[in-house]
Image (cartoon, rainbow, N blue to C red):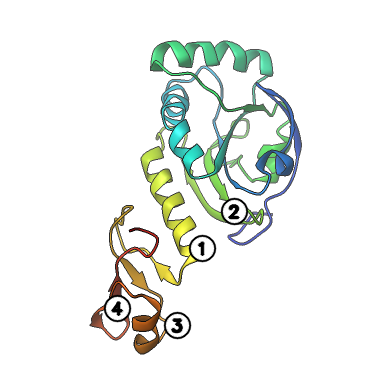
Amino acid sequence: MSLRLGDIAPNFQAKTSLGDIDFHEYLGNGWGILFSHPADYTPVCTTELGKTALLQEEFAKRGVKVLALSVDSVANHTGWINDINETQSVTVGFPIIADEDRTVATLYDMIHPNASEKFTVRSLFIIGPDKKVKLFITYPASTGRNFTEVLRVVDSLQLTANYSVATPADWKEGEDVIVVPTIKTEDAIAKFPKGVKVVKPYLRYTPQPNKD
C-alpha cells in the first residue's frame, strides 16, 4: 500500500555503509531525508550522491539527517563511494542502505513494476520530527533530482510547521510568505508585526517571520 502525506514513515532495521541502523533511532528527534537509487555504479546516481555530499553541511544546519538507499550490497557501496568521492570531489559522510532483499524499497513503494521489476525508482521522502511523511517526490531512473530544490522544500516545511504561513511559487529563504487563509486579516496584522500586505482578501503577504 502506498504511503501518503501525514502517514508515519515505516521503521526498519538495515545494514548500511556506516554500519547497522534502526531508522527511527537514526532520525532521533530531527528531520530526515530518505532517497533511493536504482543501483550502484550508475552515472546519474553518482552525480546525485555527489551533490548531496556537497550539501551535507546545509542539511546539517537545518537538523536534517540524510540516508540513501540502493539494492546493492555494503561491499558494493564501499567501492562506489570511493568512485563518488573521486569523480565528484566530495566526501560522502552519510549512510547508504544495502537493501539487497528490497525490504525497505517495498515498505516505501520504491519499486514500480511498469518501470522496472528489479530496480527502485528515484523516490525521495522528507520526514518530520514526528516521524510523519511531509513530502515525497518520484523521478524516473533517467532523470537526476534537484537537491537545491530539496533544500528549498526543507526550508519551507520547517518554516510552515512553526508559523501560520505558506510559501508562494518559487519562494526562497528570506522572501515574503503568504498568511494562511484561516487567519482573519485583522488577526494577521496583530500576529505579524512586520506588516501584512493585502493583495486580495485571500492573498496576503508578510515578511518571513523568523528572519530579522
Count the numbered circles shown: 4
Identify the mark nearer the N-term, 4 or 1. 1
**Kind of residue at disc 4:** Leu
Q: Given contact means CB atoms under 8 Å apart, are the residues at marks 1 and 3 in contact?
A: no
Q: Which residue is mark 2?
A: 128
- Rounded to the nearest angstrom, the CA distance separating label 3 from label 2 is 23 Å
Identify the mark nearer the N-term, 1 or 3. 1
Q: Which residue is mark 4?
A: 203
**Quarter of the view holding residue 88:** top left
Q: What residue is at 58 percent from the left and 60 percent from the top? A: 5
Work out whether residue 30 or residue 92 is closer to the camera in this orientation and state it.
Answer: 30
- Rounded to the nearest angstrom, the CA distance separating label 4 from label 2 is 27 Å
**Quarter of the view holding residue 75:** top right
Give x and y (percent) for residue 166: 40, 67
Q: What residue is at 64 percent from the left and 55 percent from the top? A: 3
Q: Which residue is mark 1?
A: 161
Give x and y (percent) for residue 187: 40, 86
**Kind of residue at disc 1:** Ala
SS type, badge 1: helix
Question: Crowding near pointer 1: few (<14 within 10 Å), some, many (20+)?
Answer: few
- Rounded to the nearest angstrom, the CA distance separating label 2 from label 1 is 9 Å
